[in-house]
Amino acid sequence: MKFLEYTPLDSINLFLDHLNLGESTIKGNLEAFSCKHTGTDRKLSLSLEHEILDYLGQSSDSDPSSPVEYLSSRSSRRTLIYLVLTLSHMYPDYDFSSAVRAHLFFREEEWETFKQIYDTYLFEAAREWAIAHGGSSLLESMTKAIDELVKLNECEIYSYNPDFDGDPFLEKGAIWSFNFFFYNRKLKRVVSFRCCCIRCFCLRQQPGNRGLSC
C-alpha cells in the first residue's frame, strides 16, 4: 500500500491529533492509501492469499457463521487483503497476518452508520472544531476530503471491530475507539479513519509522557 499525501487531510489530522477535552483526549487520524503493493506488502499479500485458499480447502460452508461463501469470491478476497494491508500500515506493531481471523471483525457499513458513530462519539470534537474554525462543520470538512480522494458515492465502507486481543488501542487505556475504511474498487484507493478517546491519566502514565498534562 502506498501512502498518499493529501493536504486537505492535514488540518483535520492536526486538530484530532491530541484534542484535549479535560479528563480525556481524542486522538484521530485520516490516511489515504493507493492499493499498490510495496515489497513488504507483496510478501504479506501472497501469505494472506495462501492462508485463505488453505482455509477454503479445509472448510465446509455448512456452518452459517463460516466466511467460506464470502472468501470464495476472488474480488472479496482481494478487498479483504487490501483492508488487512491497510491495517498493517496503520498499526505496524500489531500482527494482522491472519486474513481469515481479520474477516470476523470487518463489517460492511452504510454512510448513515458512520454518521451515527460520528454523532455519538465526536460531538464534542465537532463543537471544538466549530469554535476554532468560525462555525464550520468538522463532518462536512471530513466528507469533502474523503470524497475528493475516493468518491463516496462509489465507495464500500467497512468498520473494523476487533476482540480484545486484536484491538490496537486496548493497552493504551482507550475509553472507546473505532476504525472505518472507505474503499473505491475502481480507483484502488482506501481512506482509513481511526479514532479513540483516552483518559488523560493513561496518557500521563505512558512511557515518555512523564509530566504531560492533558
Image: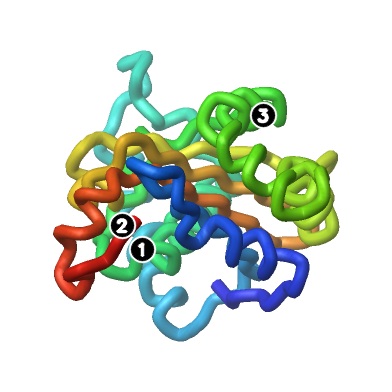
Label located before the other in sequence (2 or 3)? 2
Q: Is residue 205 above or below residue 61?
A: below
In-front residue for pair 26/160: 26
Q: Residue at x 71, y 62 (%)?
A: 188
Residue type for callout 1: Tyr
On the image, numbered disc 2 is attached to which residue?
Answer: 96
Give the quarter of the figure containing the C terminus.
bottom left
Label located before the other in sequence (1 or 2)? 1
In-front residue for pair 150/178: 178
Crowd around label 2: few <14 · some 14–19 · many ≥20 (10 Å): some
Residue 6: horizontal and vertical position, in percent? Answer: 73, 73
State which quadrant residue 11 falls in: bottom right
On the image, numbered disc 1 is attached to which residue?
Answer: 91
Residue type for callout 2: Phe
State which quadrant residue 120 falls in: top right
Residue 36: horizontal and vertical position, in percent? Answer: 61, 74
* In this rendering, the label closer to the viewer, 3 or 1: 3
In-front residue for pair 172/90: 172
Disc 2 on helix, strand or loop? Answer: loop
Q: Residue at x 84, y 58 (%)?
A: 148
